[in-house]
Image: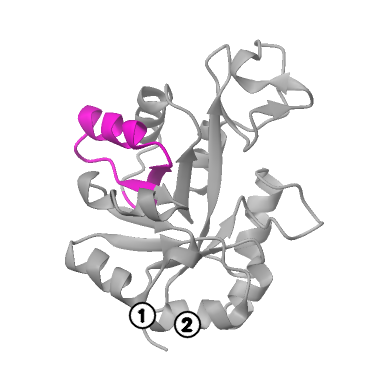
Amino acid sequence: MSDLPLLLGHRGARSSKLAPENTLASFDLALQHGCDGFEVDVRLTGNGRAVICHDPKVDGIEVSRATADQLLHLPCLEDVLQRYCQRAFLNIELKVSGLESKVLNSLRECRVEENYVVSSFLPEVVTELKTRSAKVRTGIICDKPGQLACWRETNVEYVIPHYSLVTHALVQEVHDAGSKLLTWTVNNRKAMLRLARWRVDGIISDDTELLAQTFARSE
């Protein structure tokens, strides 16, 4: 199969028991399995750190209220950019608003110019990113039909729907609009192959070993 999609780990190699999700070890493992990159979740602490985590609470601590001496074990966005930006595609998902300037500054400081997308479920976050930088590559994430219907209004480079929303016609429509389509979270081999035949631009999976094996890739 020519023109294979990007193979991306969901929060790293999420299905693996060898490393916790959203950690450097998990990101390393996704690449070792043969993925091209990974999706990473970003939240803002009370003291202004852009940290890598999915849930609003970690170890019983509200991330948005965390102080300088709390949650120090969580990697920050700068760590991820410096470590991976030259060798992996990064889907940087912003879970909350208020991170826009910090993320754009980090991208500039690390000289990240391609092989990334800054994505969010929140249209206002995507709009704010575009307002602050015309060059930033953005994506809107959708898991409901109503959200998907609004993607044309967001002026994004990437549309990122849950795989249950993806049809061959949608892929063609997104491509005709000049955008790309990544889809999540695909953990079934038949679904992976079907989506690849439809020419999606990227497949995000918890099972990075299965994803890489399906397309016969290894590091």
How is this picture coloured?
one colour
Q: Nearer the viewer, residue 52 or 193?
A: 193
Residue type at mark 1: give it: Asp
Indicate the quadrant where residue 18 lies: bottom right
Labelled disc at residue 3: 1
Mark in the foreground, 2 or 1: 2
| Residue occupying image coordinates x 51% and y 34% | 95
Q: Is residue 124 magenta?
A: yes
How many marks are shown on the rendered structure? 2
The answer to whether any part of residue 108 appears in the image is no
- Residue 120 forms part of the magenta stretch: yes
Residue 50: percent from the left, percent from the top?
Answer: 53, 26
- Which segment is the magenta one? 114-140
Of the numbered discs in the image, which one, if any, rests on residue 37?
none
Q: Nearer the viewer, residue 9 or 78?
A: 9
Image disc number at residue 194: 2
Q: Is residue 208 above or below residue 122?
A: below
Where residue 181 appears, x then y in whole percent?
A: 35, 63
**Residue farthest to the bottom?**
1
Q: Residue at x 31, y 69 (%)?
A: 170
Q: Quadrant of residue 179?
A: bottom left
In what quadrant of the picture does the N terminus appear?
A: bottom left
Which residue type does callout 2 highlight? Arg
Q: Residue at x 39, y 42 (%)?
A: 118
Q: Earlier in the sequence, mark 2 or mark 1?
A: 1
Residue 219 x/y as whole percent: 60, 71
